[in-house]
Image: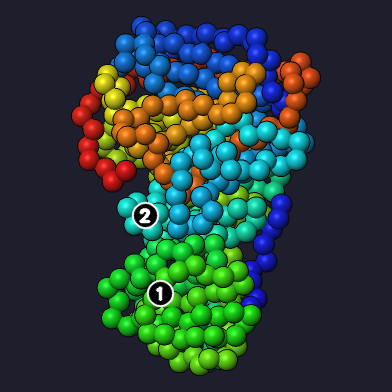
């Protein structure tokens, strides 16, 4: 079977390094506002911010990483071993084998997902240049890392076709928990062993074809389940597309081709929801609620990444609105930023000075760590001291929460 063409593709800090304590506000110091900014690796820093709304209690972790170049930080895709599978961020980060000569120094949760069901992410996904999943519905915005290691925020489009004996048919979804009405979905071994029945829910006509080595092995009138073997694909058609799949016979030749169009030679893609910052200014995107939050941003040249995680759903810490998160990222230097999954999914981990292993840097109410479908890991060149390389660039000083940050009752949210 013809597959799409796929693009393949700091040192540890000294234990005695001291935290740098700064203070200030947007224009003037705010009472109780404080900032702690410490190095994690060469070119990677972690700031702990305090909002006036919590009486000076630190409630936001902001990690910055200098991307690109041989010694710059790099970002790797994290998952639980399948598209339709979940695991905690610490577990995924621990399971990742860092590239040779590098250490995992930080990790963060990723996309919103089909919670309580398949666990599949809602947006697009790519790992090491390999397309894992198409965006679902309107979840087209994503954080994209190009071959040179730099990052950006942009819309991602899925394109694909299935060449059947009766002619070419457009693919509408890849490893997705939902197939559009009348559409054709493709599932690969990356999907995992979760049932595909949910993707066909409500469809009056359903047909599924199992294809291995470009040859149809089986055709059936319903969506199935179970693991898909490497080298085998399953086509699931609904409505009109089901009629085309049902016309196939055992032994027919079928080939598929697909790709993600992200506007450049992407290596890693992870989906998100609302764009929070564009051209250096908050977009005004809002869901009208306060929650724990995770967000990602990039400088205009894509060489500096910002990861923010805000505490919430705990006593005295109400969480943040999306406009507040956007303001913090824009003030930190983000030219563009994207909302990642928040609530009980929010998790930002970073290693401590001179220690191995990652420690969670944000807090959210709930029963322990929530399993999620994917995330991002930050790796840095292995080494022993900061002295072996250039000092990380300091963060801008005007980073505490805006004075407008005030507690409010959280509105209901799916996550």
Question: Is residue 60 something that shows in the picture?
Answer: yes
- Estimate how packed mark 2 is, as few (under 14), some (14 to 19) or many (20 or more) residues with alpha carbons within 10 Å: some
Residue 217 in the figure: left or right of residue 66: left
Question: Is residue 275 something that shows in the picture?
Answer: no
- The residue at which mark 1 appears reads as 224
Q: What residue is drawn where x is 48% and y is 82%?
A: 209
In the rendered image, the quadrant that contains the N terminus is bottom right
Q: To which quarter of the image does residue 233 belong? A: bottom right
Residue 237 location, x and y as percent? Answer: 41, 79
Closest to the observer, 323 or 65 = 65
- Between circles 1 and 2, the one closer to the viewer is 1
**Real-space Cα separation, disc 1 to disc 2, in angstroms:** 18 Å
Please tell me whether residue 93 is drawn above or below residue 168 in the rendered image. above
Considering only order in the chain, which callout, 2 or 1, is on the residue closer to the N terminus? 2
In the rendered image, the quadrant that contains the C terminus is top left
Please tell me whether residue 317 is drawn above or below residue 305 in the rendered image. above
Mark on residue 114?
2
Please, what secondary structure does the residue beneath circle 1 have? loop
Residue 91 location, x and y as percent? Answer: 51, 40
Residue 350 location, x and y as percent? Answer: 55, 27
Residue 43 in the figure: left or right of residue 413: right
Q: What residue is drawn where x is 40% and y is 88%?
A: 243
Residue 18 in the figure: left or right of residue 291: right
């Amino acid at each position: 079977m013809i597959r799409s063409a796929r693009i393949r593709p700091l040192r540890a800090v000294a234990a005695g390094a001291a935290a740098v304590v700064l203070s200030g506000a947007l224009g003037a110091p705010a009472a109780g506002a404080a900032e702690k900014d410490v190095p994690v690796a060469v070119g990677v820093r972690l700031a702990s911010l305090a909002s006036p709304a919590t009486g000076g209690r630190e409630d936001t972790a902001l990690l910055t990483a200098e991307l690109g170049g041989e010694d710059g930080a790099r970002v790797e895709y994290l998952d639980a071993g399948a598209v339709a599978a979940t695991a905690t961020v610490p577990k995924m980060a621990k399971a990742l084998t860092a590239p040779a000569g590098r250490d995992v120094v930080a990790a963060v949760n990723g996309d919103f997902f089909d919670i309580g069901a398949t666990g599949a992410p809602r947006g697009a996904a790519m790992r090491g240049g390999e397309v894992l999943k198409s965006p679902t519905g309107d979840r087209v915005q994503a954080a994209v890392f190009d071959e040179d290691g730099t990052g950006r925020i942009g819309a991602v489009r899925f394109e694909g076709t299935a060449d059947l004996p009766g002619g070419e048919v457009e693919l509408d979804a890849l490893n997705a928990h939902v197939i559009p009405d009348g559409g054709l979905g493709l599932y690969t071994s990356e999907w995992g062993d979760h049932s595909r029945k949910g993707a066909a829910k409500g469809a009056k006509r359903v047909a599924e074809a199992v294809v291995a080595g470009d040859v149809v092995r089986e055709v059936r009138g319903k969506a199935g389940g179970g693991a898909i073997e490497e080298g085998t694909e399953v086509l699931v058609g609904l409505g009109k597309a089901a009629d085309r799949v049902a016309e196939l016979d055992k032994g027919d030749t079928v080939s598929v081709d697909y790709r993600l169009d992200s506007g450049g030679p992407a290596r890693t893609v992870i989906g998100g929801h609302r764009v929070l910052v564009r051209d250096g200014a908050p977009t005004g995107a809002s869901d009208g609620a306060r929650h724990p939050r995770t967000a990602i941003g990039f400088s205009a040249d894509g060489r500096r990444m910002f990861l923010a995680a805000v505490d919430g759903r705990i006593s005295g810490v109400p969480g943040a609105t999306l406009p507040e998160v956007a303001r913090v990222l824009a003030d930190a230097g983000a030219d563009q930023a994207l909302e990642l999954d928040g609530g009980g999914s929010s998790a930002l981990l970073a290693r401590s000075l001179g220690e191995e292993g990652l420690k969670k840097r944000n807090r959210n109410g709930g029963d322990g760590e929530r399993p999620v479908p994917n995330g991002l890991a930050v790796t840095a060149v292995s080494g022993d001291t900061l002295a072996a390389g250039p000092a990380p660039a300091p963060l801008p000083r005007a980073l505490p929460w805006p004075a407008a940050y005030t507690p409010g009752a959280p509105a209901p949210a799916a996550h």
